[in-house]
Amino acid sequence: MFIFVVGERNQFRSFVNQLSLNFVQSATMLSDKRFLPPVLEITEDGSHTLYVPELNEHYHSTHGAMQESTHIFIREGLIHRHLFNHPVQHEQPELQHGPEAQRQLSQEQSLQSSRAINVLEIGFGTGLNALLTLLEAKKRKINVFYQTLERYPISVEAAQRLNYPATLNRLEKDTTVDTPIQSSQNDLNDAKLRNNTFEKLFLQLHTSSWEKPTAITPGFTMLKQQIDFSQPVTFIPEKSFDLIYYDAFAPEKQPEMWTQEIFNHIYSLSNQGAILTTYCAKGVVRRRLQAAGFQVERLQGPPGKREILRATKPYTER
């Protein structure tokens, strides 16, 4: 998540360097108020979130951090983009049947499956969206280039206190066992192995270099950048994007991150058929996405939230 802080540059740097869940006394100015490191909290699904008292804002829904991220960004974003949102195939009539048509179709499918989905995330925050994307992409054999922007990243020490690996391990165990669990040594070994794997991947996401692409797994490359996206024209990426996770703090807390200029810029950086998902379903956000050129739909939200938005950049005829 992005946190807009007003103060001197050296105060910013001091805040970022000292930010951790140890809640060491570090401070800067936020609209003339003392701003302390965020507080670790447990949400209703058992996963952690962070709470910023001065903003009265959480990084995730208190009804469940993991189920919120899974619903909005994985199910309605990544999976939808992978399964349903492919370009319309403009076939030549003479090649609709026969060996040549099959060969071309096979080549197209091979190219489509091997090409990475380019993801842009606005607000790296705790790294939960990135972790869930990595795991889902690995399961579905999707190659992903994941570019994420965060002006004020949390420390590695803070990330290590988040319980996402343990929560994932518990949820995976729950969904793969239909009967009451009788813990055997094999069960315990499998659970430990899964937990170690999740912890290792999550730590890699946070320890990977900033401003430099890093291969976390053979099919998942991440580029983290410390950027103030409230000035969007300064962001000129090398790639265009297929999927955008828009996960800044709420408009009433961070209005500079929900401007028409930002959505216009995102539209210009998006491939045809690109999808943007966000937890914020406010009318002003929907209208600005539409004004930028997106086709916007309201979708059912995760527990505790009535609606979310999914915006699609339409295809044009070739």
Image (cartoon, rainbow, N blue to C red):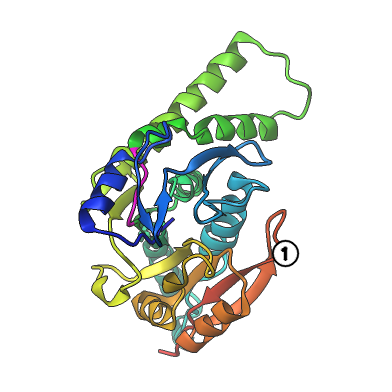
Crowding around mark 1 (Cα neighbors within 10 Å: few <14, some 14 to 19, many 20+) is: few
**Amino acid type at image mark 1:** Arg
For the point 72% across and 55% down, the residue is 304
- Front residue (pair 243, 97): 243
Q: Is residue 152 magenta?
A: yes
Say above or below: 25 vs 1. Answer: above
Q: Which residue does the image show at 54% across and 65% down from the upper left?
A: 278
The location of residue 219, given as percent across then percent down, is 36, 47
Q: Which residues are magenta?
A: 151-155
Taking depth in this image into account, of 314 and 122 the one nearest to the observer is 122
Q: Quadrant of residue 7?
A: bottom left
Q: Is residue 310 left or right of residue 269?
A: right
Q: Identify the residue under disc 1.
A: 306
The residue at 52%/49% (across/down) is: 53
Q: Residue at x 31, y 73 (%)?
A: 231
User: Which secondary structure type mostly characterizes the magenta part of the structure?
Assistant: loop
- Residue at the front extreme, as displayed: 32
Q: Quadrant of the N terminus?
A: bottom left
Q: Where residue 61 sits in the image (x, y, percent)? A: 62, 52
In the foreground, 107 or 21: 21
The quadrant the C terminus occupies is bottom left
Q: Residue 280: tell me if it is visible.
A: yes
* Image vertical order of residue 130 relative to residue 169, above or below: below
Furthest residue in direction top, as rendered: 185
Element carrying mark 1: loop
In this rendering, the answer to whether 251 lies above or below 5 is below
Count of number-bearing discs: 1
